[in-house]
Image (cartoon, helix red, strand yellow):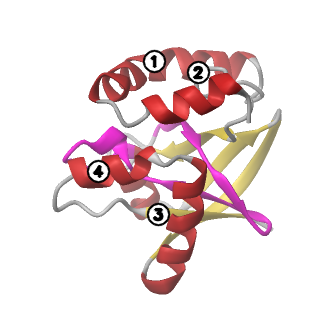
Amino acid sequence: MSGLAGRVRALGHRRWFARLGRAMVPADRVVGRLTGGRIVALGLRELPSMLLTTTGRKTGQPRTQPLLYVRDGDGYVVIGSNWGQQRQPAWALNLIAEPRATVTVGGQQIPVWAHHVTGEERERLLARLLAMWPAYETYRQRAGDRELMVFRLTPAG
């Protein structure tokens, strides 16, 4: 991992970084769309990132969110950290309501099925997510009683 990516990982624990990250989401979304998902997450290529498109549970409209992920076999694992806020992220609630989604990774759009993981599987996948982005532990503490939902996104078909 480059020095820049390592520094960003260290800064991820800071409150101001979470505020900056939330503010950057719209720009990340645009850059991700323009690059076909090749550049997302503040442009740090060392951090695996995707665009996740869900169906809005209230509107029925597509909703796209840039996210970090880890691979798990043929699937992708994401966490509903919401930067440590007290409420669940809308995209996670959308996946609970409608588990069919699309990920855009490295220029490819891949239809996926989302599975909200719990128990031992959640703990195993959470350890992998924490190894990639240690600040998820800080976000978990800030979220209070809210459990950060972990999803495994499996390619459909």
Looking at the image, residue 148 lies above or below residue 12: below
Residue of label 1: 24
- Residue 1 in the magenta stretch? The answer is no
Q: Look at the picture and state if 10 lies above or below 137.
A: above
Q: Which amino acid, by three-letter code, is at mark 1? A: Met
CA gap, disc 4 and disc 2: 22 Å
The residue tagged 3 is 150
The image shows residue 67 at horizontal and vertical percentages of 55, 40
Viewer-side residue, 109 vs 15 = 15
Residue 97 - label: none
> In screen coordinates, is 124 left or right of 35?
left
Within 10 Å of the Cα at label 2, are there few (<14), some (14-19), or many (20+) other Cα atoms? Answer: some
Residue type indicated by callout 4: Gln
- List x then y, in percent, for residue 46: 73, 34
Q: Earlier in the sequence, mark 1 or mark 2?
A: 1
Looking at marks 4 and 3 on the same chain, the residue that comes earlier in the sequence is marked by 4
Checking the image for residue 42, the label placed there is 2
The residue at the point 83 percent across, 32 percent down is 107
Residue 79 within the magenta-colored segment of the rendering: yes
Residue 75 sits in quarter: bottom right
Q: Earlier in the sequence, mark 3 or mark 2?
A: 2
Image: 7 above or below 87: above
| Residue numbers of the magenta segment | 61-90
Q: Disc 4 on helix, strand or loop?
A: loop
Closer to the camera, 87 or 156? 87
Q: Which residue is mark 4?
A: 88
The x, y position of residue 115, in whole percent, is: 54, 70
